Amino acid sequence: MDLSLKESMRLVRNDRMTMRWGEMDSLAHMNNVAYLRYFEESRVAWFNELEIDYESTSEGPILGTISCRYLKSAVYPATFIVTSYVGKLGKSSFGMYHEMVNANNKSEIYAEAEAILVWADISAAKSRPVPVWFRQIIQGD
């Protein structure tokens, strides 16, 4: 992925996480799906921090696409830092970038992902323009 993408975005979270034993695959490293779950966990923690309540407001960001580049296998036991960035603002979407690094050696990158999230009216199942208050967060205002 393009390093300039990360540099053009705003850091919103750093999460220290620990690999679980059951996430190993038959090759004795973390299964590829687990990486995406950790990225999701970071995104959801950020949404919770912003008090986005899907039940009461019936609108919020949903994942439109995600692509992941696996750079180095995480092997149990592993502790890592997931960093999440936000930017690339559209009318009804915004971009996020995630990176997973070894907590004991930050130059060791396990994976990076680029995601596009769509602001959606959940009950109508349709996209909506990103609200002004959320735009301000993305733009750092």
Image: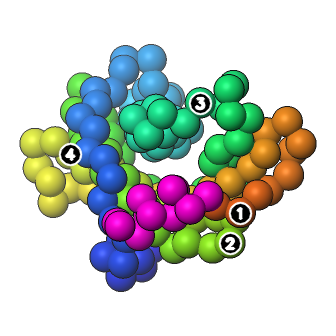
Mark 4 crowd level (few <14, some 14–19, many ≥20, 10 Å Cα): many
Q: Name which of mark 4 and mark 3 comes first in the sequence.
A: 3
Residue 129 disc label: 1
Q: Main secondary structure of the magenta part?
A: helix
Mark 3 = which residue? 53
Q: Name which of mark 4 and mark 2 comes first in the sequence.
A: 2
Mark 2 crowd level (few <14, some 14–19, many ≥20, 10 Å Cα): few
From the viewer's perspective, tell me whether residue 115 is left or right of residue 98. right
- Magenta residue span: 131-141
CA–CA distance between discs 3 and 1?
A: 17 Å
Q: Nearer the viewer, residue 107 or 43?
A: 43
Q: Amino acid at mark 1?
A: Pro
CA–CA distance between discs 4 and 3?
A: 32 Å
Q: How many marks?
A: 4
Residue 91 disc label: 2
Q: Amino acid at mark 4?
A: Asn
Residue 139 sits in which quadrant?
A: bottom left
Residue 136 sits in which quadrant?
A: bottom left
Residue under the image location 16 percent in, 42 percent down: 103
Q: Are marks 4 and 3 in contact (CB under 8 Å)?
A: no
- The mark closer to the camera, 4 or 3, is 3
- The mark closer to the camera, 4 or 2, is 2
Q: Amino acid at mark 3?
A: Asp
Q: Amino acid at mark 2?
A: Lys
CA–CA distance between discs 4 and 1?
A: 37 Å
From the viewer's perspective, tell me whether residue 10 is left or right of residue 137. left
